[in-house]
Image: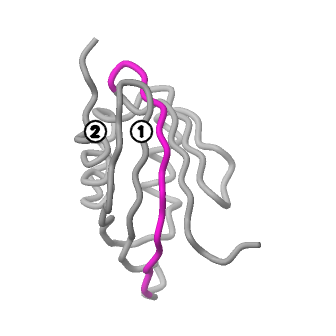
């Protein structure tokens, strides 16, 4: 079993930010589950790709990672996303992600956003 590094998380965000969604096959497990506020959990690679290609309300932007912590089974990161919504309005939001890693790829991802909610 190879050791997973924080490169896995950086590769995830490079693929998302560049809109090179086919690269998600390299970093995400085929049976990925992605939990994101405001959506039902996305299960499987096809569902994840449909979200990024068709449903995501973000038109463009970049994740700026403050820190990434990863071992062979789990990981976490936090930072800030700066970008544009599809309607042209600005996005500036802090976020955090947790990960479960299986076979060297992200098997489960859960995102948290620092916005007023409760």
**Image point (59%, 42%), residue name:** 42
**Residue 54 in picture, x, y percent from top left:** 48, 58
* Mark seen at residue 29: none
The rendered magenta stretch, by its main secondary structure, is classed as strand
- Write the start and end of the magenta stretch as one range: 90-104
**Image point (32%, 55%), residue name:** 67
**Image point (30%, 68%), residue name:** 62
Q: Residues within 10 Å of mark 1 (few under 14, many from 20)?
A: many
**Residue 107 in picture, x, y percent from top left:** 47, 30
Viewer-closest of 20 and 2: 2
Query: Per the image, is 96 magenta?
Result: yes
Q: Quadrant of the N terminus?
A: top left
Query: Per the image, is 5 magenta?
Result: no
Which residue matches tag 2?
8
Q: Quadrant of the C terminus?
A: bottom right
Label 1 sits on a secondary structure element that is strand
Label 2 sits on a secondary structure element that is helix
Q: Quadrant of residue 25?
A: top left
**Image point (48%, 51%), residue name:** 97
CB contact under 8 Å: marks 2 and 1: yes
The image shows a total of numbered marks equal to 2
Up the image or down, 63 lies above or below 109; here it is below
Q: What's the image's color scheme? A: one colour
Which residue matches tag 1?
75
Viewer-closest of 12 and 101: 101
């Amino acid at each position: 079993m190879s050791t997973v590094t924080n490169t896995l998380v950086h590769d995830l965000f490079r693929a998302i930010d560049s809109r090179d969604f086919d690269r998600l096959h390299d970093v995400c497990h085929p049976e990925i589950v992605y939990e994101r506020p405001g959506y039902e959990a996305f299960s499987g690679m096809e569902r994840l790709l449909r979200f990024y290609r068709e449903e995501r309300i973000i038109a463009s932007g970049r994740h700026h990672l403050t820190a990434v912590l990863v071992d062979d089974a789990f990981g976490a990161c936090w930072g800030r996303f700066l970008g544009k919504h599809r309607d042209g309005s600005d996005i500036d939001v802090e976020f955090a992600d947790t990960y479960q890693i299986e076979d060297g790829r992200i098997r489960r991802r859960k995102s948290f956003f620092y916005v007023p909610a409760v």
